[in-house]
Each structure stands twice: as C-alpha cells, then as structure tokens.
Amino acid sequence: MVTSANPVRGPAQPELGPSLPEGVRVRILRTAHGDRRAAAELASALTERQLTGLDPLPAQPPVLLRAYRQEVRALPDTTRRLLLLAAADQYPVDTHAFLRAVTATRLDTRPLVTAEVAGIAHATAGGIVFRDPWTRIAAYETASVTDRRAVHLLLARVLRGEGESPRRSWHRGAAALGPSRRLAAELRAAAHTARTAGDHALACALVERAAALSPEPSERARLLARAAADAWRSGDADRARRLVAATDDDALGGLLALRAGNATDAFDALLTAAVRYADDGPGPARTDHPQHAAVHLLARATEAAIYTGDLRRCREAAAVADRLGIVPPGTLGGLAAAFEGRYDDARDLLKAAAGRCGPGGDPTLLIHSGIAALLLGDHTAAITATVRAAASARAGGDGVTVPQAMEFRAYADFWTGRPRAAEAATLEALRQAYTTGQDNGACHLQAALAMFAAVTGDEDVCRERAEAARSYALARGLGLPAALALFALAFLDLSTGRFAASAARLRALAGFGPGHGHRAIRHIATPHYVEAAVRTGDTRVARAAHADYDHWARTVRSPDDLALSARCRALLASGAEAVEHYRTALDLHASGTRDFERARTELLFGGALRRLRHRTEARDRLHSALEAFEHFGSPQCAAAARTELRVLGEPVSPVRGADDLVARLTAQQLMVARMAADGATNREIASRLLLSPRTIDHHLRGVFARLGIRSRIELVRLLGER
C-alpha cells in the first residue's frame, strides 16, 4: 500500500493563535493534513468570513508549496518521474497501483535513492512514502501536463482487479485532454458505484472530474451540485462549500447553512427548495424523485425550525407540506401542534414518528424518530433510534450524520443518569462535528457537555462550555443550544444551592423568543424551575408553568413526566399532602427511566420528611439518594444529601473511597490528570478536550490541591501506582 508519512511536529513548528474559533482551528489542521507550518500559513490568510466559519477555508498554503516545488524541481528527471507516478497513485484518489505499474513497465527504481537522500520520500515494501502530503502534492503539480497524462494512462491500464473500475475510470478521466461526453458518462457511472459502496470522497472526485469533462453548462452545474453533496457526506465541508459556490443549488446551500450558518436563512432556503422540487421536478439533491426530495428537504427545514425554536416557521413548513400534498415528518406536525397547545394531536403525531425507528432505516428519519421519542419522554426509544441512526449513517459512509445523532442522544443520556460515559461519547461527537464543518451541531454538543459538567460538579467547565455555546448560538439564531446552555447554568445553580440565581435563569428562559430560547427546553426545565421558585418563595409563575407541564404529562402518559409533575405538586404543597404527592412521584419513577431525577425526588422527599420529623423514613430516603448520586458521579447533589443527613444527626460516611484517586477528582479533573501524567502539555490537553488552556491550568491546580501534591512528577507516581 502507498501512503504518506505524518508530518513531523517538532517544537519549532508554529502554534495556531488562541483566538481562532475552535471549529476553524480543527478544520485548518485537517486541511493542512496536521502540518502546523501549513496550518499557520493558512490561518494567517483567513478573511473575516472564513474566521467566523461562514466561507470555505483556502485549500493550499502557497508559500509552503512553492518551497516544496523548488525542492522537487532540483531532483533528477528520472527521480521526478517515479515520484510523479507515486503521487498520481495517491493524489487526490488513492488507487494502490504504483507497484503494479512499476512491474508492468519494468521501471528502474534506483533513482529513488536521490529522493531518500534529500529527505523527500523513501521506498518501502508497499510503495513510496512521502515526507508529508504537501511534498506529494508538489511532486504531482510540478510535472508537465504530458507527463501527468502518461502516468494516469499507465495506472488506468494496470487497474484491472475486481472492484477497481471506479479508480480506473478516475485515471482515464484525469488523462483526458478536453471535454468528452463518453468519459463524463463513464465517470458518472463510476461515481454511482463508489457512492453505493459508501465511498463518498471517491464519488466526489469522480463527479467533479465528470463536470470538468462535460461540454454542456447545465450538466456541469448539476454535476458540481452532486459532487458538493458527496463532499458533504464524506465530511469535507470546505470542499462542499467551494463546489456549491459554483452552482445555484438552494437545497445544498440551505443544508450547509443548517449545519454551519444562520438557522433562519437555512430554513428559508430549504423550504423554498422543497417547494421547487415538488413543483418543478427532479434535480441534484439526495434523490432524483421530486416528491422524495421534497420530503427530505422538509425534514431538513424541520431541523432548522427546531434549531431556531421558531413556532411560526414550524407552522409555515406544516402549511407548505399540506399545500403540496406531502406527509411531513411527524416531528414537524407534532411540534406545531404542541406549541399551539393541541397536545392530543401532538401526542399522536409524535408517537407515529417515534415508532419509525427500525434497524437499517434512513438516518435522517431515525434522528427525527429519536427527537419525537425525547419529546414524549421515552428515553429508551430515543437511545434506540439515535444509535440506529448513527449505525445506519456509518454503514452508508455518511459519517457527517453521526454527530447529529449524538446531539439528541445526549439528552437521553443526561436524563437516565449516565453523565460520565455520555461525556466521552459527546466529546468525540464534538470533534467530529468540528472536523466536518458542522459548527452549529458543535454548538449544540457544547451545550450538552455543559449540562454533563453541571451534573458532575465541574463548575468551571460548565460555565466555559455554556458561555461558548450561548455566544455562538445567539449570533446564529440557534435557540435550541442557547436555551440548553442556559438550562445547564440554571441546573448548576440549583444543585449548588444558588436558588435565586437558578430561578432567575429559568424565568429568563421562559421569556426568550425565537433564536434565543426554545419551548421544548423551557418545558423540560419546568420541574427545576418549580423547585427553584419554591426555594425562593415566589411560586405564582411556577404554579402556572406546572399546570401546563402537568397537562402535557397527562396527555402523553410518560411515567417520568408524570413523576416530575407529582414532584412539582409536592413542592407546591405542604404537610401530609406533600408526602402523598412524593410517594406518588416515586411510584411513577419506578416505571420510568430517569434514574437521576428519581434520586433528586428522593433527596427532596427526604428533606420534607426530616422537616415533618419522620426521621426513620427520611434517613432511608436520603441514604438511597446519596448512594445514587455517588453512582452517577454528582458530587454537589451528594453533598446536599449528606447535609440533610447531618441535620438529622445521622453519622455520614466520608466520600466513598476517599483514598481512591478516582473518588477524589471530578470526571474532568481525572481526564486532565491522566493526560498530564502521560506527558501532554496544557495546550495539548486543551486541544484534545476542546477547552481553553486557562481552564486546563485551573484543573491541574485543583488536581494538585485535592491530591496534596506539588508537581507532575508526583502525579505520574500516583497514577503509576494504580
């Protein structure tokens, strides 16, 4: 196999500026193939729109490439020809045919010694390994058109194995001297084969070459739009944007805006495209069947409406679907009905959507199924649908959809009390979202990570992630992540006893309009708002909020929602009446899946029993809650349970496993400690965890304080003992 060596990342290589947005930084490093010299050059040339992630990044670092081309040109012609053959075999499509081409033509490979001495490339048993990807590109681009054509024809001639026809077609197309309908048709067919196999990067290269060889302008535009769709599905957002810019495809433009632009603009573009496809016929979208394309675009428009939290747009999309005679995604009609207070209709529509979660389905429909299940309070179904969505996307080579599935999987993980495991999965999804140019999805995932940090007691991380999410979301009209981030901060305040601050945040959440807040988040935050309001003695608004929440819970009959409604009722009552409502809540929790909320209900119930002097039952409830919070890794809630037990005069055991390193550190501190012990610098740790170096420094100081140590050497020793 022919590959390229990873670039050397020595200490002399330049660092990217700390002010660079995280999504742009990750994409620059990907574009630069991880070479920080190239990345620094690309970063220095960014425009304002590129810095904000709105325009595609530059494809190549001209200064670095110019220097590399000079190195290649200094080599003997025989060496350069061998390097050209190897480069053409690898760039931009990896075809694994170099050794066969050398054997077929009996080429003398001894001139490669000169390239090895120059440190440009070296030969292995599998082929040629270039110093780095930019050297490989320089070796290809310094050759003449005639020489490139010759090596492409040679490589096409030796690619005769089973399944190699798409790559053979690529080389035939690359060797073409001018427009050719025949070759363009061959490349289109090859792209279809690659796409069916899930290789969207190869399909993109083939269709883009077919566009270059097509003599008709209209056909070229259609093919470029198809290539952009393949580039997007392969995870190359910058290439997709560059290709879309050469077309007038509002569907693809809307999709890109949905994932990285203004959500309101995305909605308008997607809805316009849906109408056009339904009225005018097929085009270059996901499918050539106009009705299917319109349904798919309506699903995407629904996602845009969900992101914005704009009820008016939900209604508008539902009306368009009705006019076109299209059955819209169940989430669209369900959301519109729920926001209008037609809860019975909303329940029926959402249940129908949630039921479409069988294995092997369309990833978009499965994600919508998961969203519907979340709205119904069925977290088991939500997990099933989103896991299947991710699996289906991976099977189809559609990796760009995987982090989107995780955006909504995170809610179910939060409510079912799995913050530590979910945090790792969500962090990986965040990296994927940034890498594939999905900054809007990354914003949503940042808000989810803020939520997990609130549960696990990482206050600084919660605030940093929540503020990052809110600042980005408010600039792009993303009401959903803005509201989720605010909820994370409110939950943090609630769990640390800052009840007035929590109530104020949750009241603000209720008042925010489209693009700033979200009805769904306001709804799921209601039980926490009631608790905060009761703690501050201001229950007038809380009672009205609970009445609406209770109406929804009774309509959908979700055990968890009914349990939380009963808990609200208990908080708003007193004496024996409150006790009965708490008992009802715990009975309902037993049939639900929100184990973390069950523990919080036990904590509140235990406190109420203590105040009523029901000491024995209060002790049992509080010990049960304490055990659950320790299991969930929620130190602040565990501390509240210990405080209640101490007031009871109950002896409280020290923090479980206090002599254990894991028990003494928060989840984030433990992760930072392990990376630091492995030798990673603060900047490297910050890059891996997608946090600021300042936060990492704060975490390490906290680690040292909690463990009673003063240096990384002691940290290495401590971790080495475990």
Image: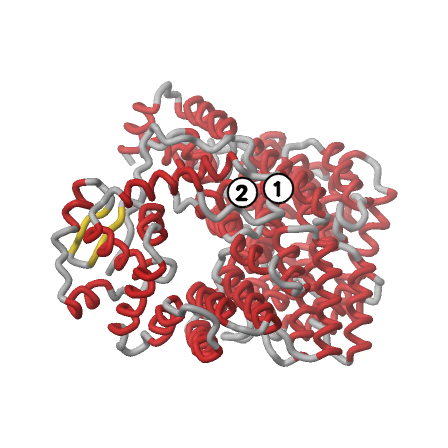
**650 or 203: nearer the eye?**
203
x, y (%) of residue 641?
A: 59, 37
Q: Who's the residue at 60% across and 78% down the image?
A: 288
Instruction: Give the residue number, with chain letter if any, for mark 2.
Output: 24
Secondary structure state at the residue bearing disc 1: loop
Q: Who's the residue at 59% across and 65% down the image?
A: 367
User: Which of the image's four quarters has the N terminus?
Assistant: bottom left
- The chosen color scheme is secondary structure
Q: Which amino acid does the dot numbered 1 rest on?
A: Thr
x, y (%) of residue 616?
A: 61, 42
x, y (%) of residue 589?
A: 63, 57
Confirm whether residue 217 shows in the render: yes
Q: CA distance from mark 1 to mark 2?
A: 8 Å
Q: Around disc 2, counting alpha carbons within 10 Å, would you say few (fewer than 14), some (14 to 19), or many (20 or more)?
A: many
Residue 516, compared with residue 520, is above or below; it is: above
Examine the image and state in which quarter residue 460 appears: top right
Residue 23, compared with residue 388, is above or below; it is: above
Q: Which amino acid does the dot numbered 2 rest on?
A: Val
**62 or 238: nearer the eye?**
62
x, y (%) of residue 31?
A: 45, 47
Q: Are marks 1 and 2 in contact (CB under 8 Å)?
A: yes
Residue 678, compared with residue 547, is above or below; it is: above
